[in-house]
Amino acid sequence: MRTIALINQKGGVGKTTTAVNLGACLADLGKKVVLIDIDPQGNSSSWMGININELHKSMFNVFHDNLPIREILHETSIENMWVVPSNVTLAAIERTLANKLENDTILKKSISPLLNHFDYIILDCPPSLGLLTVNALSAVKEVIIPLETKVLALNGLVTLINTVNLVKDTLNPSLEVTGIIACMFDIRTNLSNKVVEKIKEKFHDKLFKSIIRESTQLAECPISSQPITRYAPDSRGTQDYMDLAREVIEGEKEVERYYDEGEAETSRHFDEESKEAGQQNDNDEDEIEQHSGEVETEASWQSGEENKEVDRQHDDGENEVNQCHGDSENGTDQQYNDDAEEGESGTTHYADEGSEDVDPQNVNNEKETGQHSDEVEREADSQFNDEKNEVDQRFGEGEKEE
């Protein structure tokens, strides 16, 4: 399975002529071919007999609505060849998709279901290096550059190669320039020969051996809606494109090696990215651990200093409290001793003064109390005796009366 984009930002160099006729020759050689037209001019589509003005679904719907590309596969008059059409509506797609995420890989996702069902997928690209061409370069593994054998055609070739390399580096590591096709070669002039020699000198083995010569039949056959192999089977245009198709098929082994290397390069690219990401993660983890260790060390040191400061303040506080307590106890003891001495002295003095002043009074009181008690006892005895005599008297009188 080979995917090929025919690109050149310069118009009128033979892109569409090569896309249609190379596809038809490959189909005649037994290959199953799909021609995808992503040029808004729709020249490949109309060349293959499709009325592009009456299309209800086209490549616009594939880009804009994610329409499965299989739904717009059209059969052609060539056995083993199908075409996916486009028309002028595709011209607006670049502006429509300008702000869409992953807008450069839409075509790659769209053609992936076709890869195992066809031998060749050929993309006819617009004469620009815009979003549609970038989508084509992201979707394929091979680039073939049709080049007009004129001096001015060489001017944009370096820019084109740089664009392919940029897409290879950023979007599609397996992308390779398979070859350059010298088109519209005029055998009557030395200029065409000089341009071909210049291409060989600059790009070495990238130039196909098959050269597409200028031909009246090639210019006329689009009107017939048929490829050159049907319009003029015996023309030199048919001969040139059949030679090119055979050369392309013969290069399949070489291309398979490119594909394998491309897959290996893609795998290596992703492995390097994964390794780099892993290394970055390890470095980040080491840096985090180192930073954490430094933070812990600093925190421990700071905590130790704080503990030392707290202990020092605590010791100073205890010493100050002990000193205050000692001073207080000493003051209290001294005060107590002073008060005790003063109290004892005062008490002794008071006791001495009381002994001298109070004792005579106490003696007089005791005498008066004793005298009073004697008087009370005598009065009580006298009263008792009087009552007893009265009772006895009454008792005696009573007996007499009886």
Image: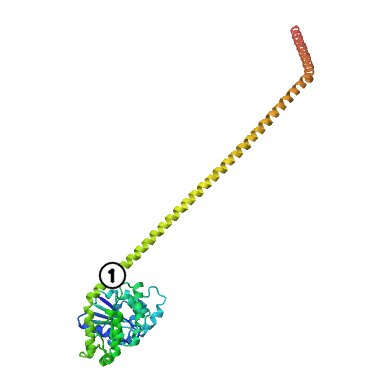
Residue name at image x 30 percent, y 67 percent: 267
State left or right for residue 197 relative to residue 379. left
Provide residue 99's location: percent of width, then percent of height: 42, 75
Residue nearest the observer in this picture, 170 or 108:
170
- Residue wearing tag 1: 263
**Quarter of the view holding residue 325:** top right
Label 1: how many Cα within 10 Å (few below 14, some 14–19, many 20+)? some
Residue nearest the observer in this picture, 52 or 182:
182
Provide residue 204's location: percent of width, then percent of height: 28, 79
Residue nearest the observer in this picture, 365 or 27:
27
Q: Is residue 333 visible?
A: yes
Screen quadrant of the N terminus: bottom left
Provide residue 46's location: percent of width, then percent of height: 30, 87
Provide residue 88's location: percent of width, then percent of height: 36, 85
Q: Is residue 344 above or below residue 263?
A: above
Q: Residue furthest top?
A: 400
Q: Is residue 295 above or below residue 330?
A: below
Name the residue type under label 1: Glu
Residue name at image x 29 percent, y 74 percent: 112
Q: Is residue 84 visible?
A: no
Screen quadrant of the C terminus: top right
Residue nearest the observer in this picture, 128 or 161:
161
